[in-house]
Image (spheres, helix red, strand yellow):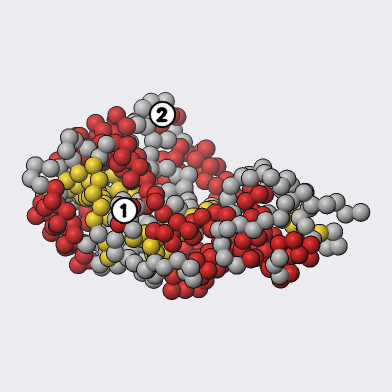
Amino acid sequence: MRLKSPWKPRLSGEAQLPCDRLAAALAEDILDGKLAAGERLPPHRDLAWQLGIGLGSVTKAYGMLERRGLVHALKGSGTFVADTGGRKGTVIDLSQNAPPAVMSERLLARTLSALARQAEPALFNSYPPVPGHVRFRTGLARWFGRLGTETGPGRLLLTGGAQHALTVCLSMLSGPGSLLLVEAQTYPCLLTLARYCGVRLAAVAMDGEGMMPEALDRALLAAGPGVQASVYLMPTMQNPVATCMSRARREDILTVCRRHDALIIEDDVYALGADPSLPSLASLDPERVFYINSLSKTLNPALRIGGLVVPAAWQERAEACLYANGLMISPLSCLVMEHWIMDGTAQTICDAIGEEAARRRALAASILGEAMPPHPNLGYHVWLPMADQEAQALAAAARALGILVTDPLATAAAPENGAAGVRLCIGAPAQAELESALKAIAGLLANLRGTIAGPLAFQA
């Protein structure tokens, strides 16, 4: 005798097609713990009759859940809730922006074995200088040079990742009445840090290359005289919109900032290599630009080593802020960095990440089609521009299916503008999970756009 399913049949209101609504309802109840691992789902025909939907819709919904690892089918017995390891919430996470995993057990073991033979006890028995040991700053400066920004160790401060470097910058530039100008869609953590540091924010309109120089000029004029204004930018592979500034746009932005004596924080964490036609802002104006890069996006997310290159006039103040915000970078991480840069492993890893990023971007483009604007640079996120109402609906519908995307409000510097979008982070999930999630999102987007009016817009 077969056990009766404990599930009370229902359809979710988050999507349009019956199969999507059924899959969303079941996913919600499984992930919320209302259906335990091993419990049986209703038979296809019984469920179709109870809900008044087609048998094919039930079959499609069960198939969607099985591909997401939420259920498993036993031939001749039925469909059962899978053991998800006690996890609640999402199964496929497209909200965390991490590079594709290329670290192998063999590489990790070989690295740790080499360090065990080479590590110097003195590195672990004392505090380093505030900006970091010269040998490690020299190594990171060499790596920055390979990415297109030449600097010396004397201008470089080691930080605990790019977010730490951002914190140092905001601490220096957050005096009374200071103003930070950002693109209308910008890095979520930057918004959080700025609000935490009490920095006043102003959103600047964007186009297909990012921040618009004429809009920046107007914003700086509106700030008025005597205001310490600074500008935060990601010229290469902007997060979240994935735009890239041409050389002409970079020079125009610098011209505007020189006119108003505004400083620039350049976040370059997605640069996977040097492009002479697209120099960093710091290369074009090193005395105006605070340059940030790190290893967590280009080599490994656990390698939390960042670098902050500061204008010479700000060196002393930057070291004081670094000291106040957290002094010591892990010497073990620094040794890994040095070893990888010296023996060529870093470049090999970076190349492998770039190749995998290209494959994933091509996969996303093939599935999402015109919903995903093309962009020239490699990265681990794609952007789906749409009106705010549509973005919120898509995020909610995806969440109901066990797919987490970046909250549209998290990237909006000026939510009241109404122009928004959804960021999909495609670097971290396994290939099969990524493909399944992208197909589900493409289907949801097609359904939602049949019911919600909203323009596709880059400009905010």
Residue ID at (75%, 61%) = 50
In-image side of 55 versus 350 (left or right): right
**Nearer to me, 443 or 288:** 443
Q: Residues within 10 Å of mark 2 (few under 14, many from 20)?
A: few
In-image side of 265 versus 51 (left or right): left
**Nearer to me, 365 or 349:** 365
Question: Which residue does the numbered mark 2 point to in the structure image?
Answer: 122
Residue 190 image label: none
Residue 416 image label: 1
Quarter the C terminus occupies: bottom left
Residue ID at (37%, 68%) = 456
What's under tag 2, amino acid-wise? Answer: Ala
Q: In this view, does 137 lie above or below 81?
A: above
Q: Is residue 233 visible?
A: no
**Nearer to me, 279 or 221:** 221
Q: How crowded is mark 1: few (under 14 residues within 10 Å), some or many (20 or more)?
A: few
Give how far across and how far down residue 364 sits, in percent: 49, 68
Q: Can residue 454 be seen in this view?
A: yes
Residue ID at (30%, 67%) = 208
Quarter occupied by residue 284? bottom left
Give how far across and how far down residue 215 sits, in percent: 18, 59
Q: What element carries label 1?
A: helix
Label located before the other in sequence (1 or 2): 2
In-image side of 23 versus 455 (left or right): right
Give how far across and how far down residue 380 sits, in percent: 44, 59
